[in-house]
């Protein structure tokens, strides 16, 4: 048994990794909730409405669950780093699982959104799918190269890559939060619905495309540094 003081220190030292593991667990749950809020039979796709508008009868419950879990997961990305720095709780495990958790939280929902955009014939669905493929493909490639590196430096993440991840989280969060907006608006008593404008849709696609461009740039930067 740990003495009371040492037990507290022991718990604090593991807090950053616990937050990261929570994010890793939440990532597939977010993707599942997004899928459940949008997924429809193929025969219904021809009558699909505008982007971001779930079609299933129970869609808003799933959309709200996806939004809440995504926000919680994104907050763990902020607080695990803060906790590690504040309590000097850096660890080799944390350096390994933190980028994996980040990529899972970005990649899994993006894959689901890409499939849904094609199923429901969203505006510019091809652009959405290509941008998502660039982001997911880059993350898989660079993660494999980092872990294949012979030394521990191979798993460190650059500051630019951290900004890239932040932009990707914004790009993923926009459609997830917009999908939950009707429930939030009604719950706050601010109205009976939420209309999605073409400008908002195009704005999201622009953010997603910018994230994909930055993802490709950081990949090229990493590959050149290795050569």
Image (cartoon, grey):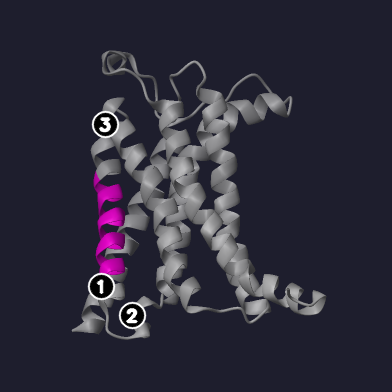
Q: Position of residue 29 (x, y in %)?
A: 48, 41
Q: Secondary structure at mark 2?
A: helix
The CA distance from mark 2 to mark 1 is 8 Å
Asked which quadrant contains residue 224, the reply is: bottom left
Q: Is residue 187 above or below residue 204?
A: above
Q: SS class of the residue under badge 3? A: helix
**Magenta highlight: main SS:** helix
Indicate the quadrant containing the N terminus: top left, top right, bottom left or bottom right: bottom right
Q: Is residue 99 left or right of residue 12?
A: left
Pointer 2 and pointer 1: residues touching (CB < 8 Å)? yes
The residue that mark 1 highlights is 145
How many numbered callouts? 3
Residue topped by disc 2? 154
Q: Where's residue 10, x and y in %? A: 68, 75
Question: Which residue sits at x=60%, y=21%?
Answer: 193
Residue with the mark numbered 3: 118
C-alpha separation, residue under disc 3 versus residue under disc 2:
36 Å
- Within 10 Å of disc 2 (Cα), the crowding (few <14, some 14-19, many 20+) is some
Tell us which disc is closer to us: 3 or 2.
Answer: 2
Earlier sequence position, callout 1 versus callout 3? 3
| Range shown magenta | 130-144
Give left or right: position of 71 versus 8.
left
């Amino acid at each position: 048994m740990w003495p009371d003081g040492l037990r507290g220190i022991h718990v604090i030292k593991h807090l950053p990794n616990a937050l990261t593991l929570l994010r890793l667990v939440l990532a597939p749950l977010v993707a599942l909730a997004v899928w459940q809020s949008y997924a429809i039979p193929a025969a219904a796709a021809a009558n699909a409405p505008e982007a971001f508008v779930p079609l299933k009868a129970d869609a808003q419950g799933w959309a709200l669950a996806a939004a809440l879990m995504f926000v919680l997961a994104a907050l763990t990305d902020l607080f695990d780093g803060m906790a590690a720095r504040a309590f000097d709780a850096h660890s080799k495990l944390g350096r390994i699982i933190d980028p994996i958790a980040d990529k899972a939280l970005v990649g899994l929902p993006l894959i689901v959104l890409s499939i849904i955009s094609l199923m429901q014939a969203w505006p510019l669905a091809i652009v959405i799918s290509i941008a998502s493929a660039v982001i997911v493909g880059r993350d898989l490639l660079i993660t494999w190269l980092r872990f294949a590196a012979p030394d521990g430096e191979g798993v460190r993440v650059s500051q630019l890559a951290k900004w890239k991840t932040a932009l990707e989280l914004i790009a993923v969060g926009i459609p997830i939060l917009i999908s939950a907006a009707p429930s939030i608006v009604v719950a706050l008593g601010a109205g009976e619905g939420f209309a999605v404008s073409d400008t908002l849709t195009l704005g999201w696609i622009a953010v997603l495309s910018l994230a994909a461009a930055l993802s490709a740039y950081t990949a090229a930067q990493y590959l050149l540094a290795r050569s």
